[in-house]
């Protein structure tokens, strides 16, 4: 068993910089995609509550279709398919857009549930004291929604972080692609992929703990 850990000591000076750089790329990819997904998800959730029927139907159709399409198919479409009609994304941008488009549907459903959790009387009371609909949403409704959905949103971010590994298949230089290159170079795939898994765990575990604490009922 001790022989399993020997390469970590022998190659630590070579593996550590490569894995740290890949962790940074993975974190940047995940944070960028999640930020864009939040914006798109919020717009979709507002469309779902819109008084305009066309917007409601569009949001419902988008959520239904996107949640039924594999993320990998979306990434391949953006990176390999769109150049056929003259739209070209670099690998990183395609990964960010693909992850955001897919996870926006999940976030929209979370926000829709959060909006439903806020009593309608809150908005009516805000309008009654003279706030505009935009002010009512920004100052009264949105803070309450954030409190309700924050823990599920963190769990969604962790899911996005793990799914970002699929970006390696469109040549994004994140943890999995770096690990594959290292395994080819050093012929130690078991040790290297264990290290890659630990890197994902190191990023995701603090967020998992945070979401668990936020989900605990207040005492």
Image: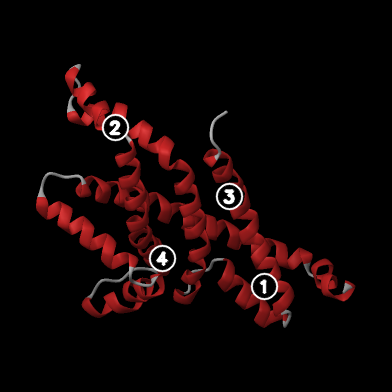
Real-space Cα distance between discs 2 and 1?
A: 48 Å
Real-space Cα distance between discs 3 and 2?
A: 29 Å
Please tell me in which quadrant of the rendered image residue 176 appears: bottom right
Real-space Cα distance between discs 4 and 2?
A: 38 Å
Q: Which mark is residue 193?
A: 1
Q: Nearer the viewer, residue 168 or 91?
A: 168
| Quadrant position of the C terminus in the picture | top right
Question: Tag 4: Cα neighbours inside 10 Å, few (<14), some, or many (≥20)?
Answer: many
Mark 2 or 1: the one toward you: 2
- First-in-chain label (4 vs 2): 4
Residue named by callout 2: 119
Question: Tag 2: Cα neighbours inside 10 Å, few (<14), some, or many (≥20)?
Answer: few
For residue 174, above or below residue 218: below
Residue 89 in picture, x, y percent from top left: 34, 68
Mark 3 or 1: the one toward you: 3
Residue 210 in picture, x, y percent from top left: 58, 43
Residue named by callout 4: 95
| Quadrant position of the N terminus in the picture | bottom right
């Amino acid at each position: 068993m001790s022989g399993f850990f020997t390469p970590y000591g022998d190659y630590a000076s070579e593996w550590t910089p490569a894995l740290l750089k890949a962790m940074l790329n993975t974190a940047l990819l995940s944070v960028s995609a999640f930020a864009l997904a939040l914006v798109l998800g919020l717009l979709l959730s507002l469309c779902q509550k819109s008084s305009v029927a066309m917007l409601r139907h569009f949001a419902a159709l988008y959520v239904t279709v996107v949640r039924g399409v594999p993320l990998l198919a979306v990434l391949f479409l953006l990176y390999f398919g769109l150049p056929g009609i003259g739209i070209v994304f670099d690998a990183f941008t395609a990964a960010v857009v693909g992850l955001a488009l897919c996870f926006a549907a999940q976030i929209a459903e979370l926000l829709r549930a959060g909006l439903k959790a806020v009593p309608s009387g809150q908005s009516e009371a805000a309008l009654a004291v003279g706030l505009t609909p935009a002010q009512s949403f920004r100052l009264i409704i949105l803070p309450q929604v954030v409190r309700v959905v924050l823990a599920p949103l963190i769990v969604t971010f962790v899911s996005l972080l793990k799914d970002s590994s699929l970006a390696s298949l469109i040549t994004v230089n994140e943890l999995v692609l770096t690990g594959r290159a290292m395994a080819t170079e050093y012929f130690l795939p078991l040790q290297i992929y264990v290290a890659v898994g630990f890197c994902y765990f190191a990023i995701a575990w603090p967020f998992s703990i945070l979401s668990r604490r936020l989900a605990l009922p207040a005492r």
